[in-house]
Image: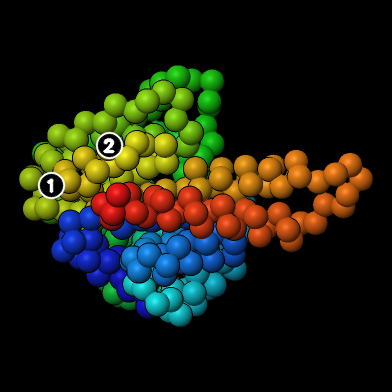
Amino acid sequence: MLVTLKEILSIAEERQIAVGAFNTPGLESLQAVIGAAQELSLPVIIQFAQCHEPWIPLSVIGKIMVDHAKEAKVPVCVHLDHGETLPYLQQALDIGFTGIMYDGSTLSYEENLENTKKAVEMAAKTGAGVEAELGSMGKRESGSGDESKTEDDTKIYTDPVQAKRFVRESGIDALACSFGTTHGIYLTQPKLDFEVVRGVRREAENIPVVMHGGSGVGKDDFHAAIKAGVRKVNYFTYMDKSAGVACADYLKTLKEGEPVFFSYMVMEAQRAMKENVKEAMKTFALMD
């Protein structure tokens, strides 16, 4: 069942949970995520980030994502994650995406706000919802980054008072906030400031807060973030990693000289992603 970003966040708000938002830059990850959501009877957001364009074009996977969402037995929002340019956001809307994120976090506040306003105007023509980012989580959604660093000094925490103005003037449906998480692999235990989340919710009329950099965060911290007001959690890196580990484990089972079949590795990867996603979904829905 294809739903909009606003509709799926309303479900999360009503249940006082967070909806998992999983990047699906391939058929295997797409089927794993929707399969997990259907088994658990939970709403889900499937995403494609602009930085995944070299892996597979949005023009190819986007249509498949929309078709799978329409056929799903649970509410599914098809969302563009970290859209960096307005034309790219429009491309997602034209395909049928029901949510878009404009990421102007590296720009000045005023430029970020002006471009976000344009994104809201674009999305309104199709009924799609808009997520924006204020502050910076650092690194990219691809999970890559300089892993030689033990601290990510590119992070800028979100100011709740500034968020109030940004939300009011832009008209967005969700705000990605920086409160201590980081995109990619965690090299040190994250220190999360949940007061930032509570402050944004308090100042910005209970705007649904989005948590990026969710992979690698402990269950207790997830629960605390959700209770503070997080309603969408982006999760990809550790799901992707689970598929890689499954492939490596499959190769270890082969005897010397035994042929390697890509199709077998794909099946192992998909199974691993599905189980990893199910555990994440249960955590976000406060089911464990």
Looking at the image, residue 116 sits to the left or right of residue 227; the answer is right
Residue 277: where, in percent of width, then height?
45, 54
Dot label at residue 201: 1
In which quadrant of the rendered view does residue 287 lie? bottom left
In which quadrant of the rendered view does residue 12 lie? bottom left
Front residue (pair 162, 226): 226
Instruction: Give yes or no for contact between labels 2 and 1 (Cβ–Cβ under 8 Å).
Output: no
Q: How is the image coloured?
A: rainbow
Q: Which residue is mark 2?
A: 221
State the separation of the CA atoms marked 2 and 1.
18 Å
Dot placed on the residue nearer the N-terminal end, 2 or 1 = 1
Please indicate, yes or no, whether residue 150 appears anywhere in the rendered image: yes
- Identify whether 235 is placed above or below 33: above
Q: Which amino acid type corresponds to the residue marked 1 in the rendered image?
A: Arg
Q: Residue at x 27, y 37 (%)?
A: 220
Looking at the image, residue 89 sits to the left or right of residue 264; the answer is left
Residue 4: where, in percent of width, then height?
31, 70
Please indicate, yes or no, whether residue 170 appears anywhere in the rendered image: no
- Identify whether 178 is placed above or below 132: above
